Amino acid sequence: MNHNGILRRLDPCAIAAFVIPLFVYLLTLAPTVTFFDSGEFLTAISSLGTAHSPGYPLFINYAKPFTFLPLGNIAFRVNFATAVSAGLACFGVYLLTIQLLKGEETPWQGRFGALVPRLAGVAAALTFAFTPRLWLQSNHDKPYPLLAFICAIIFYLMLLWRESYLEGRERPAYVYLGAFLCGLGTGAHQIMVLMIPTYAFLIWSADRRVIFRVREFFIAFAFGLLGFGIHLHLVVRALRKPILNWGDSKNLTQFLWNILRKGYPVDKPHRDLDLLWAQMNAFNIPHEFTVVGLVLLLFGLWALMRTKRDLVLGYLIALGSFLLVIVGYFNTPGEMIFLTEEFFTPLYLLSAVFIGVGLITLINEAVQHLPDAPAARLFLPALLFVLPLAVCLLNYRENDQHKNYIAFDYASNTLRSLPQDAVLFTWGDSGAFPLWYLQGVERMREDVDLPHTPHLVFDWYLDSMPRLFKNSRLYELPMDQRTSDGTLMIAVGEQYGKRPVYVDFSTKYSIEFKDFVVHQRGILFALQAAGTPAAPPDLDVWPLFSLRGVLGDRDMFFRDLDTGKAILIYAASLMESGETRLRMGQREAGARDLEVAASIAPEIRPRVAALLSANGVAQ
């Protein structure tokens, strides 16, 4: 084997477009489980199960091999898998930028040869790498970077097909492979289909007569269906009963229920101009790439309109498709808009490509007015990397999660609070999913049952917990009579007296427990039947807690919505504990709890001061 020949064929710029982002992602990688969907994805990946609708079978099967690496815990390995997919997405930006610049004349060619477009490709890749959206998705388990990479490769295949076709050479294999990847990509997320109009336009615009090629159309459709076959994972694994088996797709009815996302609310809010504007702003180029990036994007689109107009129109079709469906059809309520921000990741990838073109377009104007001197040979290429460096510096601290143990500690503190063989009813996803990971993957506190209240309305979920619900009255309730409140109270009633019953902070403040007295135990609350002898709250569990990143570690800067909520739960629970201690006459301990609460959440300090003053405690 001629190793020297292989090395000569390697493209150092292509390697840099992947390796540099991956290196930075590893520096900022979350060391364990995080909030939101993380714990659920990790549990599904570890058990080769099914996550929430539509199941994410491609992401689960992609990440599973990484769980065998001898690196850290399972969560870290899956986070590493996501970082790799994000690096591949950046490589996709490089490929597309090089392809779009192919054949474009530039004053740089005489001075720098073929190096210029490659450097522009690296600059575009790094600019995309350091956007807050992709960076946030890269450092913990997320399917969107993998989806963006697949979208980029399909776009690249369509460009290769166009190039060969316009040169008189038929290469239908590019289209067939692209169709297969489209079907496969839906296993990462169904927003894959929003890119299909763009891919179809790239084919049709090369020759409008291709729409009459019925045979090739059906072959492409068959390849797409073959790729979509990744969803058979849901059926095959449902029959094996993995730890996490969302929707239990053991038959056609349940499979379609899962694929068609039937478990989500369908009520749409009334949309006014304020809501529409907020929904539109879920796609925000200036936020991701800065205002300079927006200007460069417009320059890139303008530059290619003269020579490669169809590619620009393809981008605009993708933009219209995403906005029409995500904003127009979804009509997401204001408090849930943040969920749709991640859907635009493939569109941000394409935007980065045109920003790369814009970089060269802008600097081309400058290079014509500079002397052909050695200093210019260094200065001009360096200008390409000003934007990615600026985007990196703007977003590094906010996306650095390498000390983010808050979700792990929140879950482990919760499990430490529970007595043997307890049952804990949870409410929000972030209050439940890290617990699922610690119990289902790390095997912590397997004696505890963790029913998730919003899921108690589904038979498939009750089936997954036979120890609790094998003979439950919940099965007898018609589906239209099942509510979170009602099913929770029935389930609590069935368990009370058999086992210690607890609820988390969110449940306690979401439901009125008329028939029970609620007793605090750290960040949890024990239920005791009304009328039983009063018992003092158990407040001595706090010394068992770890508060990394919450108290005393100000280097952990990362904060998302659910991390902020967890921190506030600690503060509110400590304040409640402090008030209780003061009422019990434990002035020193009560003051200590209140001071810690104020240290965690400074915004509650005025209320803490008022409580201390009302109880005669000197501050």
Image (tube, rainbow, N blue to C red):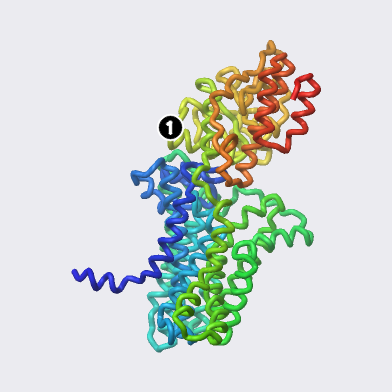
Left or right side of 351 for 181: left
Instruction: Please determine whether, in this image, residue 498 is positioned above or below residue 402.
Output: above
Q: Position of residue 163 (x, y in %)?
A: 43, 83
Q: Position of residue 560 (x, y in %)?
A: 61, 47
Say which residue appears at 66% left-offset and 13% top-offset: 535
Instruction: Please determine whether, in this image, residue 135 is positioned above or below residue 535.
Output: below
Type of residue at label 1? Arg
Left or right side of 246 for 602: right
The answer to whether residue 377 shows anywhere in this view is yes
Say what secondary structure mark 1 lies in.
loop
Where residue 117 sits, quadrant-wise, is: bottom left
Quadrant occupied by the C terminus: top right
Q: Residue furthest bottom?
A: 168
Q: Along the line of sight, which residue is nearer the eye, 389 or 186?
A: 389
Say which residue appears at 65% left-offset and 31% top-offset: 505
Say which residue appears at 73% left-offset and 24% top-offset: 514
The answer to whether residue 104 shows anywhere in this view is no
Q: Along the line of sight, which residue is nearer the eye, 162 or 2?
A: 2
- Residue highlighted by disc 1: 443
